[in-house]
Image (spheres, helix red, strand yellow):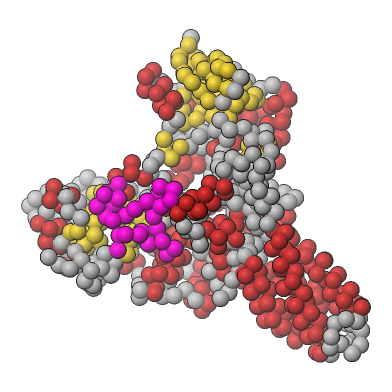
Amino acid sequence: MLPTLNGRIQTRIFMLVVMGGLITLVITPVLPGDPDYAMTYTVLATVLVLGILWELVYHGLMQWRWEKDWPTLFGLLNAINEGLLVWVLLELGVVPGLDSGVPLSTFLVMFLVIWVSIWIWTNGPMRIFNVRWRFFGGRLV
Amino acid sequence: MIDPSAGTVFPTPGAQNYLPSQPAAGDLTDALLATDWWTDELVASAGIPIVDVPFVSVGGGIGSFVTADYLRIGGVDTSQIRILSALDHPWETYEYLTRVSQIPRGERLRSDSASRPDNIWGFPSYAVSEAWRSKNPATLWQVLVEPTFADFYTPKAGFVFEQIEREAKRIRYDEMLAKGLVRVVRRRAGGGYFTILTPPEGATATKRLAFRSQYVHLAVGYPGLRFLPDLQAYRTEHNDYQRVVNAYESHEHVYERLMTTPSTVLVRGGGIVASRVLQRLMDDRLLHGAQTTIVHLFRTFIDGPNDGAGSAKPHAFMKRKGADGWAYQGFNYPKSVWGGQLKAEMRKLEGAERAAKYKVMGGTNTPYRRYWQKQMKQGRQEGWYQLAVGTVGSMTPHQGRILNQVKTAQGVYPLEVDFVIDCTGLEADIAEHRLLKDLLDHGGAGRNPVGRLDVDRNFELKGTVSGNGVLYASGATTLGGYFPGVDTFLGLQVAAQEIQADLAKRGFGKRIGTVRSTSQWLKWFSGKQI
């Protein structure tokens, strides 16, 4: 990826809302732990809000890179730090809107399915639908 | 006098629209050459037949090809486009330059996986295609872990050319091609331009043809390559074009000779071409038994973090890796010029600020490739790859060899070698290109902060507007504009995208939105001719 800060945030919001939203809709009934939609969409929203903050961090870190790029692998491995943070916050019970705890298996399956799907999509097929996206740092508007 | 700003509508081309050729040879006249704005009458009176076509692209290399590709995908018919070129195939010049500079079809270019001139989407990337074709996931793994755990993936030259050939057939490139050399482009009184083509001798009844078009696109490539002055002086003075060669001219005889005779070669330059030539010399030595000693002369020796401005302590955010003489960088520019942060930043800069930014990110550099590192390390240890830092004061023939006086920080040293390979790749000024010089003198074109053609963000050549006509330029001649990286595959596509979008706004072709993009990609994927 060759993102700009603006492009990072736009792509992040678009992908989590559209693709993340659709995947959540489809997989919630079959996730382990029998979660309801309120729980899974709250988790998705948490990932989104924290993700925007993470993008600020990544953008800062990227400044130390001469190429000002964000390699494909980084985009995949960022699942680890982001997933951990969301899980810790869920465990601490500081995520608003959740009445009960989220089972680890529910969270892990949901988070990884969405993460990997978005990662694959933004590293390839996304370009089919928008020829300008890759030349404008990931900006959609 | 027709008002130059008046609009005009061009008829579709066809034989009935050609002006009859006159008994005169149909050549450029002094009156034409002295006039900045040409009227239809002036051109006709010279006996030059006029061909009407809305869009003309001058060059016929990769730049013309990707622009035509974008336009065709944007729904423009082949009858609306003419590509004026001396080349039979768009990859012809590129293949020549890469082949002689030691990247034959089987070797890998210095180009990103998603940088595909034959595919405006860059998907699937070369790495994906290569993995699919070879049924081997190695290239997928490489592109996944690059550049941290592997060298950047780069495609094989031959595969790139084959795929361009496939796409050229798909967009019916040959139907758009008009062979010949373009002599001048002049603005037309009443709008648009005249592009004067000199077709191959005997191909037409007249010496020239005039293409009357609303839009012109220039993609003429490098204005020319220059030799280092001391090398050129030696070659002409001693009439020796065999032992002192430029990497961009055919010099296979040097390698052939080295295979049979143990010799010493002086390699000059610290860029990608020097790396390639060194690989050839080292491969010949390590794999095929040549007994070559290599002396590598750097003018600037890099041995640590660096930037293009030569800062002693580069800023923490603009620090490139370097060692053993080289500045290391994956591609010709820091990667984000093709779509990320540096592209966005440069787009906002003007004048001296822009020139300064170009300088910081520029400077000669080459990729860090593990294979090359291994070869160079072995060469240094075994003593057959030696480094020198400095410039050459003079060169003279001496007992069948070449005696160089190498000027270093410690003084002048004599260095006797059998061959000199110049890999410095100096580029000529744009005014050395006849067509570009004419545009500077008569077409209203100007220079940007680094001295090349001054184009706007949409790649319109500033100052050349003619009524409702627009003159665009892309490629190496426009280096220094709001978009860096112009002289690369992706850069040409970035330019083509801007040009196509601008033309679509003007009603020439359609906007490539989500629906068109998707349906056209499906056609590309299935290989359906458009």
Please name whichever residue, B158 or A2, is drawn nearer the observer in this view of the structure.
Answer: A2
Residue drawn at (64%, 39%) of the image: B312
Q: Position of residue B446 (x, y in %)?
A: 34, 53
> In the rendered image, is residue A69 in sight?
yes
Q: Position of residue B6 (x, y in %)?
A: 21, 71
> In the rendered image, is residue B255 in sight?
no
- Is-magenta flag for residue B441? yes
The magenta-colored residue range is B437-465
Q: Position of residue B94 (x, y in %)?
A: 46, 46
Q: Is residue B400 above or below residue A40?
A: above
Residue drawn at (64%, 53%) of the image: A67
Magenta stretch: dominant secondary structure? loop
- Is B404 on the left or on the right of B286, as rendered? left
Q: Residue at the far top: name it.
A: B399
Q: How many marks?
A: 0
Task: Please state, as top left, top right, bottom left or bottom right, where the N terminus of chain B lies in the image.
Answer: bottom left
Q: Position of residue B185 (x, y in %)?
A: 26, 55
